Amino acid sequence: MSIIVQTEQLTKTFQKQYAVDHIDMTIREGEIYGFLGPNGAGKTTTIRMLLGLMKPSSGRIKVLGKRLNTHKLEILRQVGSLVENPSYYPHLTAYENLNVIRQIVGVPPVRVTEVLELVRLTEAAHRKVKGFSLGMKQRLGIAAALLHQPKLLILDEPTNGLDPSGIIEIRELIKSLPQKYGMTVLISSHLLSEIDQIATSVGVVSHGKLIYQDSITNMRKLANSSIHIQCNDPEQAAVALHRLELAVELGANKLVLHQCSDRAVADAVKLLVHQGMDIYRVEEHKQSLERIFLDMTGGVSL
Ligand SMILES: Nc1ncnc2c1ncn2[C@@H]1O[C@H](COP(=O)(O)OP(=O)(O)OP(=O)(O)O)[C@@H](O)[C@H]1O
């Protein structure tokens, strides 16, 4: 899978304060990369640099295999974006607004109809944008970003301010893009649950630093539960449980079993009882992802 976005030590300072602090970001083809972090963490600043809207203080950016500072136009022709609230002509219809942008980006008129359909605005196509809800305006923004069939779509907090049904619609739309069009998506959010539901990989930013980057599957594994068994002879119990090929850790006066099924727990307890051991407690310990990231971000919640 080729790498679509790669930053090396990307940094931006404002008055000697780090807004983005030596970020190494990797986004692979076909991924929906969730860029997660609390307000003020540096997401928008990073995105603005990726789009060539702001110059980095230091570091390098490669998009679609090319250096951004030497191939800016060539790269941006293949990138679509929705950053902050896009502005439209309120007295023009959705169709007319998109038609203006279509002429600037140089694609055939049929694309307007296609993207309106894609974001489910066909019925509202000939209504003036000034009467649109926030959700409809966001969908129009995504339609505009999709007009030129970009390889990479960058969305900065696209569900901000939307009601639950609007959020679901945008989420379903974004999720369909990699399969339908081979697109790669970068989406930022300050909500862990949002990223968890939409992304295939995640980067967590806090105080300008990328503190975590991995697949969503591995992120979820962080929150896996463990089973704590207290018994009269934990050391002897650990030896006995090796037979079951379980991941066993010896804690203070207890055994800790990682990533095991209900069946494995039942077998472990049965074996220990069979060996004549006294079992005092069998407890499940589970750390929430919120808690894990709270610790990572030094107490700033996501
Ligand atoms: N033009 C600017 N001048 C000075 N400071 C700035 C500027 N732009 C951003 N900052 C600061 O950089 C830091 C990161 O801001 P940024 O907007 O990138 O965060 P964010 O993660 O996108 O948060 P939000 O979701 O609130 O937009 C903040 O402390 C912000 O105040």
Image (cartoon, rainbow, N blue to C red):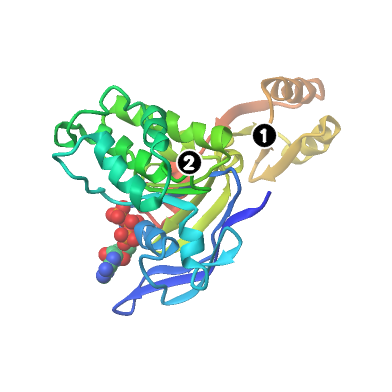
Does residue 87 lie above or below 247 as drawn?
Answer: below
Residue 102 pos. (x, y %) = 36, 45
Pick out the residue farthest to the right: 243
Residue 175 or 21: which is nearer the viewer? 175
Q: Amino acid at mark 2?
A: Leu
Residue 259's tag is 1
Pick out the residue farthest to the bottom: 16
When asked about the image quadrant of residue 240, the answer is: top right
- Relative horizontal placement of residue 104, taking residue 60 as reference (left or right): left
Q: Is mark 1 within 8 Å of ligand 1?
A: no
- Secondary structure under tag 1 reads loop
Pick out the residue farthest to the front: 108
Q: Amino acid at mark 1?
A: Gln
Residue 219 pos. (x, y %) = 56, 43
Q: Which residue is mark 2?
A: 289
Q: Quadrant of ligand 1?
A: bottom left
